Image: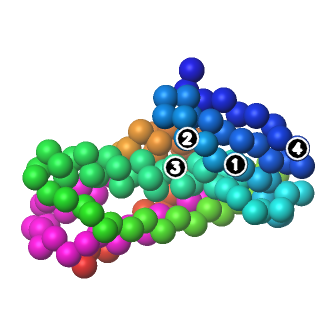
Amino acid sequence: MTATVTYDANLRTTCLHLQSGSSFETDAPSDNKGQGARFGPTDLIATGLGSCLITTMGIKAESMDLKLDGAKVDVTKVMMSEPRRIGKIVIAVTMPALNLDAHTKEILERVGRTCPVERSLHPDMELDISFTWL
């Protein structure tokens, strides 16, 4: 088992990662009867994509003796209705100044664009992923 999710009350949950013991709370979004005071479940999916993308790039970078420390991923989730779902995720990656050649950048970007979360998302979900290299 990976995690447990406990429904606390008032559209909030506590999520516990069993291996590490770390936890966080979620809240329903303000546009769907919640307070929006914490990450909502769909926020976690969009943010998970950003985290997976840069982590996968980091794994590849380490194998190339590169460090991506300071890379930043901005995540925007766009909801749709009928049915209510995530329609689009916009990912804007800003990479630190590494002075890399075009081929190395292409390798890292390709790895990021094919991370496990990206491959797990429904093909109807629109993904807009961009990279800025400083």
3D distance between C-alphas at marks 4 and 1: 11 Å
Mark 2 or mark 3, which has the lower sequence index?
A: 2
Q: Is residue 98 magenta?
A: yes
Q: Which residue is mark 1?
A: 25
Q: Are marks 2 and 4 in contact (CB under 8 Å)?
A: no
3D distance between C-alphas at marks 4 and 3: 24 Å
Mark 4 or mark 1, which has the lower sequence index?
A: 4
| Viewer-side residue, 107 vs 95 | 95
Q: Are marks 4 and 3 in contact (CB under 8 Å)?
A: no
Amino acid on which disc 1 is placed: Glu
Callout 1: SS: strand
Callout 2: SS: loop
Mark 1 or mark 3, which has the lower sequence index?
A: 1
| Viewer-side residue, 36 vs 25 | 25
Callout 3: SS: helix
Q: Residue at x 19, y 52 (%)?
A: 61
Foreground disc of the pair 1, 2: 2
Q: Quadrant of the C terminus?
A: bottom left
